[in-house]
Amino acid sequence: MLEDTAHRLDFLSLDPISKLEEEHEKQKTTVGAGSSWDDDNDYDIHGAIRLTDEQIDEFHSTGYLYLPEVFTAEELRVLNDELPGLFSRSEPYNISELSNSKIPRTNFASHLISKPFAKLSRHPRIIRLVETLLNDKLYVHQFKINKKTAFEGEVWQWHQDYSTWLQEDMMSTNRAMNVAIFLDDVNHYNGPLMFIPGSHKEGVISADYDTKTTSYPIWKVGNDVISQLVDRAGGKQGGIVSPIGPAGSVVLFHSCLVHSSSTNISPWDRNIVYLSLCATSNHIRRFKRPEYIAHRSFDPIICLLDDCLLDSTIDEQISVPWEGKLPDSALEVKNDIISDEDMQKVKEYPVHDEEELSTSCCAEAVVVVVVENPLNQLSIDDQYIVVDETMNTAS
Ligand code: SIN
Ligand code: MN
């Protein structure tokens, strides 16, 4: 199906750079630009996949949607060829497993380091889907590759991503979406994701700040709550599901969906890209986590063309600002919530003020932060949050 799409581009006669420029102009103002559907097909001329009403209903009811084989073997090869280089860099954006610092766990901000992943972060097969579901333009809030190495990959405890995005980054509503892109086949044995269907409807659930069980802290939902949610979702009959399938498949999941994954003691790596996309109108209000974890550019994503992963002629147009050494600015953090007025300035001038940073930056070991209903989203149970300011949550 997707191979056919390339032949349907109506401006193949243009050179690649003009194609891009023309496309950028078109997309500047419109959501879902390029969605000129042909009723005989389930994709548009730019490669965006059209969701059926049943799929949209399924997403709203369960909190996730599995789409098999969205990317081809050839496209996957381009992405997978980048992995050894990305994971071999000694930079803060590479996180290892807790029990063995030689085993890579996560590579953050891959889309600012590697051209193929930069292209993936602007791919119409992904971006158009999420624009449709969130009905807004999008920016990249987080980009990471979780490796789940064969024999070594460790757990992700039960959590909701939006819990972190609210409490750490002050993202005001849950209008954000996770997109998992399988770079390897994912099966029952190599530590697939586990979802509790329907759990996204609970909103933000009370969670504990777990700094012990994995190599970066996570807002972990307690066992009692998990048992209740699983029971409510059908217990042993569907209360937990694992989306599994061939490399190239994609899973969209709601930012409040409760999820986790077990260890990988199989002989197969389980590389998955997680692209966390936020509606531009819902951007974060606090830069408490470094930029390589929670991004600060809220410019709307401009999609590339459907064949972008295989088209090396556009490479000179693809910017990867962190391809060399990670800039110091990517490590800077601030604790204050940013006002609308300051937000305007931040958009123009990313946070670089050394003096301001040295006073607001947190150096103490463990402090107790009392969060009084940040943005009025949390329940009473969530008001007191213990935070170890020296570590960064990485959901
Ligand atoms: C996983 O890769 O298994 C889970 C990742 C996450 O929740 O961030
Ligand atoms: Mn997560």
Image: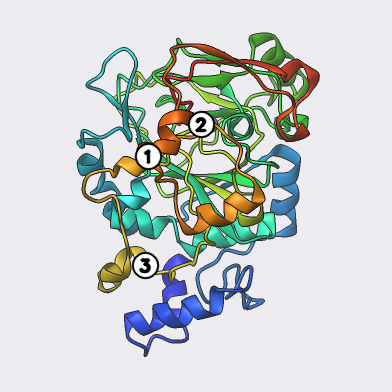
Q: Amino acid at mark 2?
A: Ser
- Which residue is tagged 3? 308
Give the distance between the C-alpha atoms of the residues marked 3 and 2, in whole angstroms.
28 Å
Earlier residue among tags 2 and 1: 1
Q: Is mark 2 within 8 Å of ligand 2?
A: yes
Name the front one of labels 3 and 2. Answer: 2
Name the front one of labels 2 and 1. Answer: 1
Query: From the viewer's perspective, is 350 left or right of 29?
Result: left
Give the distance between the C-alpha atoms of the residues marked 2 and 1, in whole angstroms.
27 Å
Earlier residue among tags 3 and 2: 3
Give the distance between the C-alpha atoms of the residues marked 3 and 1, in whole angstroms.
39 Å
Residue 165 x, y percent position in the rendering? 59, 35
Measured along the vertical axis of the image, is residue 390 above or below residue 358? above
Judging from the image, what secondary structure is the residue with disc 2 in? Answer: loop
- Which residue is tagged 1? 354
Measured along the vertical axis of the image, is residue 279 above or below residue 389? below
Residue 335 x, y percent position in the rendering? 54, 31
Earlier residue among tags 3 and 1: 3
Name the front one of labels 3 and 1. Answer: 1
